[in-house]
Each structure stands twice: as structure tokens, then as C-alpha cells.
Image: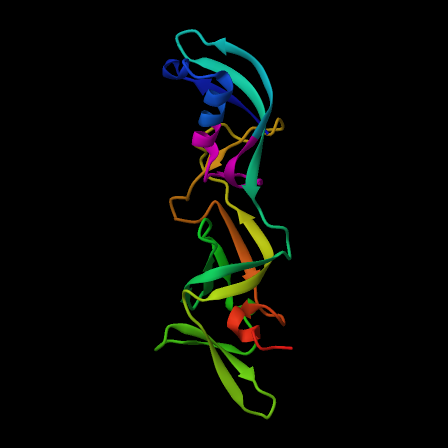
Amino acid sequence: MKDLVRISPDMFHLKLNTALESELNRKLANKVVLNVGLCIALYDITKIEESFVLPGDGASHTRVHFRYIVFRPFMEEVIVGKIRSVSREGVQVTLEFFDDILIPPTMLPHPSRFDEAEQAWIWEYDVGDGSKHDLFMDPGEQIRFKVISENFTEINPTGPEITDSNQPSTAEKTPENRAAFSLTGSINESGLGLLPWWENSG
């Protein structure tokens, strides 16, 4: 990635590398870069070009090439998280640092039902003798899921847009509170779902 980084005069006492690292992390850490993922932390700076001062601005401007640690799972990657909440729309999962993961009803084990009284999804597990055992999906439980799709929502950027030169654009929630980056998961396969379900399996 590369970006034009502005260093204000109050940071001139710092080494250039230190100031650039600080500004890049301030600008990108915990932000979504469109079609790239959730930025976690700066990995390293690979190239620093010449700095310059714009007319009427006492700050320095430096074009920087860098690598950033980004969260963006591979499709069909299996991840363990925690159930954050449940509703008729499905099971919401959190990884603590990332909450926008939904397992929709169609991706739950079949057959599953939503219990209004318990406010929980329940897998009607077939024990093999014609009877069924209810397995609850409760908030706080650890859950193993497979990533089946991702969605980036373009919103008004707070920084420079991504261009052909791969400049970053930071993004938060949309006015409708939709996530700038979200994942859809599935637990409709053997070995997926709440960890206790499979603790005693062969």
C-alpha cells in the first residue's frame, strides 16, 4: 500500500520513521480499507519518498510505501469465535476485535428452529433412534464456523479513496449502521458449530 502522510509541525522533533508510523496507525488502525479488509497494525515501511511542504501549510507531506497487517479471512476458512447474540435473522458471532459476522438461518444445522421464549436457535439433533435432542446456541458459547462470503459496503470516505495506485480509504459504519466489511458464515457441516457438540465425537 502507499499513502501521502501529513506530519504536523508538533511532531518534527520525532524521527521521520517514528512520526510516519504513528500517523499511519492513527489513520488506519481498526479501520476498514475498501476491498482490502480490517486494518490491525502497521507491519513495516518499505519506502519513503522525498518530503515536501505545501504553500500555506507548515506540515510536511511524505509519500510512503508500507505493509499493513489486515484481517480478511480466506473463503471457506474455518474460524473459532463466540456467539454474540441470536435473533430470527441468525446467529451473530464476535472475534472480540471484529463483530460483523452473521450465520443466517439457512446456514445453521438442519433442522433448526428459533425459540421465541428462549430467544435462542436450537438444532434438533437426530440421535439415530427416531428421537431428537435439542442443542441450544446461546450467547457466550464458543462456535466453529466456515467463512462462505464477504461483503464490502462503499461509504463516504474519511480519507483518500483507493485508486489504481492502491491508496487507502478509511471507512466506518454507514448512516444505516451497516458494516463497511462483514462476513457470512456457515455451521451446516459436520465438525462445525458449538465446540461442546463435538467434544466426545470419535
Q: Which residues are magenta?
A: 24-43
- Left/right placement of residue 77 relative to residue 193 reads right
Q: Please, which residue is most extreme toward the bottom here?
A: 129
Q: Is residue 198 above or below residue 178?
A: below
Q: Horizontal and vertical percent for residue 182?
A: 51, 51
Q: Please, which residue is most extreme toward the left here?
A: 117
Look at the image and tell me in which quarter the C terminus lies. bottom right
Front residue (pair 78, 173):
78
Res 55 quadrant in image: top left
Tell me the residue at 54%/57% (across/down).
184
Front residue (pair 16, 186):
16
Front residue (pair 154, 22):
22
Q: Horizontal and vertical percent for residue 143?
A: 51, 65
Q: Horizontal and vertical percent for residue 193?
A: 54, 69
Q: How is the image coloured?
A: rainbow
Tell me the residue at 54%/75% (across/down).
197
The magenta stretch spans residue 36 = yes
Look at the image and tell me in which quarter the N terminus lies. top right
Q: Is residue 41 above or below residue 95?
A: above
Q: Horizontal and vertical percent for residue 80?
A: 54, 60
The magenta stretch spans residue 137 = no
- Left/right placement of residue 101 relative to residue 149 reads left
Q: Is residue 185 above or below residue 52?
A: below
Q: How many marks?
A: 0
Front residue (pair 21, 50):
21
Tell me the residue at 41%/44% (across/down).
173
Tell me the residue at 54%/49% (across/down).
151
